[in-house]
Amino acid sequence: MDNNLFCNKNLEIFKPRTKARGPKGSLPLDHDLLRYSPSGDLFGMTMDAGIGWDPACLRDAEVLILSNLGGMRAPDGRPIALTYHTGNFELGLQVEEAAKTFKQEHLTPFAAYVTDPCDGRSQGTHAMFDSLPYRNDSAMVLRRLIRSLPTAKAVMGIATCDKGLPGMMMALASCHGLPVILVPGGTTLPPVEGEDTGKVQTIGARYANDEISLEYAATVGCRACASAGGGCHFLGTAGTSQVVAEALGLALTHSALAPSGEKIWLKVARDSALALKTLLLKGITVKDILSDKAIENAMIMHAAFGGSTNLLLHLPAIAYAAGCKIPTVDDWNHINLEVPRIVSVNPNGPVAHPTVRAFLAGGVPEAMLKLRRLNILHEDVMTVTGMTLGENLDCFEDSLRRRELKSHLKASDGVDADDVIMDISKAKALGLTSTITFPKGNIAPEGSVIKSTAIDKSVIDSSGVYRAKGPIKVFVSEEDAIAAIKDGKIVKGDIMCVIGGGPLGTGMEETYQLTSALKYLPFGKYVTLLTDARFSGVSTGACIGHIAPEALAGGPIGKLRDGDIVEVVIDTANLSGTINFVGTKDTVLTPEEGARVLKNRPVHPKVNPHPDLPEDTALWAALQSVSGGTARGCVYDVKRILKVLKLGQEALVKIEAEN
């Protein structure tokens, strides 16, 4: 061992203080506090004074600020320690702005942190097995932190990205008796020259297929994240979650997708602090804001923006936490048929505008104003502004903020706001279609999901229908599938079937490594992908995920074999579709006959839970499975779990007695 561990030339280091005088002043106690308050409340004041808060202010109402802050940032903005992703690196700036505002308003701010992982960093690794389960874990820890400060009168959540933000919304939604507010962490800036953070994740696959040079990959890989904070600058799960938070009424009007680190982004935090104080004074709680109507407004905005398919997992979980009706596949389908897509952003287009342009073009309230004449929004719902949604829209419509930001978008980027968030007639003329289709068939009797609007238009016929039929290539892991792509074993017209990627197999991993590789390879638009796993919010192409039941739950997808003939039909105009096993090279079957054959087949012999699946994730998968699975948002239905455990224990006792 190095002797420097126990030696030092400066002997003062061996003389630490053994006592200190402590804070000046005294606690603002009175007879009733001392006589009737829990000891924890009193000791809490002692600790607050010890930390350095002015003892005279310790009777002010307490507010808890929760965030996903990660890493350590120096005052000049440079990292002292890195974090998992840009989305949580600058959140401390918003925490600081909110806390200062609370203090000015004679509220005592507390801050706690539950950081979050990065789906982009996890792609292609076993870290992805923890991605979706983390959402439930973080929500659980956040709820425990809220309950662990029983003196808090209101809660603010600050979050940005794919799992941290849905987890934060689940936690806030469960605070039924408290005022809450959500501060979206915004978006990172795109580079002046280079690639967006979705495309740049494919440099490995493109290099392997001789699409780009080593030098090009190194350059664009370095500059894709052009600013230090914020979520990816495409409308993936992070951006969509921010849109949904605002549409729910949990976040201030025109707060989603603001550019991280900019003055207007900091103003969102200050304004949110003032709004939370108003909610506290008015006695407006989250139960007054989150309702079935609010959930439907969020679904409407999801459709209007063309959001990530992952929200089909997250919004039901938020609804469950709030005690609202959980939206079904039929509910989603109804909304997508009724609501036109009017926002042109990356990845759905038609122009791949970064999300910061959607913010400058007016963001969520702008899209709501465009849809107003359809009378489909519930404008009577309460929001965190302390006003109804309709009142918020009236204020925004004639605001200086709206005019100036649109003008700045035109001056800085040469883009008209109406080309980003369009009038309904203009969007229709440009061919914007609704986003999501839910194909069924003998491979997916409980349904599946495809972002049908993101299928390449050149492979869709004049009626708006995508068709694929042929022998399939089956893979029992994402690793095998991506290796086949990189090794040139996937060609134009192939139908890939990746099975065993559901919750019970891999924690329902996100397979963006596959979908992005297909998107940016010249033959990719001619390849169809079927899987029981899920996709990134930026995934595009003829990629059908969430196929249910999953392979390891006995789903028909787990019974497919190499060479089976599969037929895929996706009607992108009418939002309907089918995926059916229709026989083999030697035997042609109807979908009904195919269903009977699959029913009698054993599961593919190589389909098993991934050998590296963590025990934590296996437990999560089991708990969410008995709670209703992906259709209910992978939640923990405690009453149902306890019922299953009780019945299981009784059955086990009976079996043991018989033996």
Image: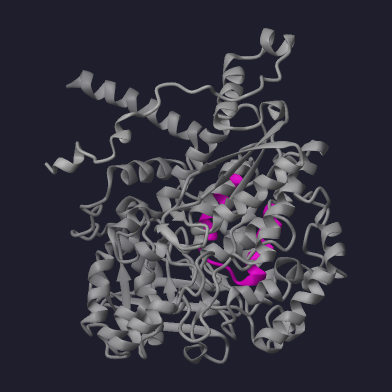
Q: Residue furthest left?
A: 1
List x then y, in percent, for residue 125: 29, 62
The secondary structure that dominates the magenta segment is: helix
Q: Is residue 333 left or right of residue 470?
A: right
Taking the magenta stretch, the answer to whether it contains residue 298 is: yes
In the picture, the quarter occupied by the N terminus is top left
Please give the range of residues in magenta. 294-320
* Residue beneath the point at 60% across and 80% down: 573
List x then y, in percent, for residue 425: 76, 84
* Residue beneath the point at 34% across and 80% down: 203
| Residue 636 vs residue 538, the one in the foreground | 538
As drawn, 366 above or below 614: below
Taking the magenta stretch, the answer to whether it contains residue 410 is: no
Q: Is residue 343 left or right of residue 288?
A: left
List x then y, in percent, for residue 499: 30, 63
As drawn, 559 above or below 614: below
As drawn, 256 above or below 47: below
| Image-quadrant location for residue 3 | top left
Q: Is residue 220 left or right of residue 154?
A: left
* Residue beneath the point at 70% across and 81% down: 409
| Residue 44 vs residue 442, the one in the foreground | 44
| Residue 251 vs residue 568, the one in the foreground | 251
List x then y, in percent, for residue 514: 34, 73
| Image-quadrant location for residue 240 | bottom right
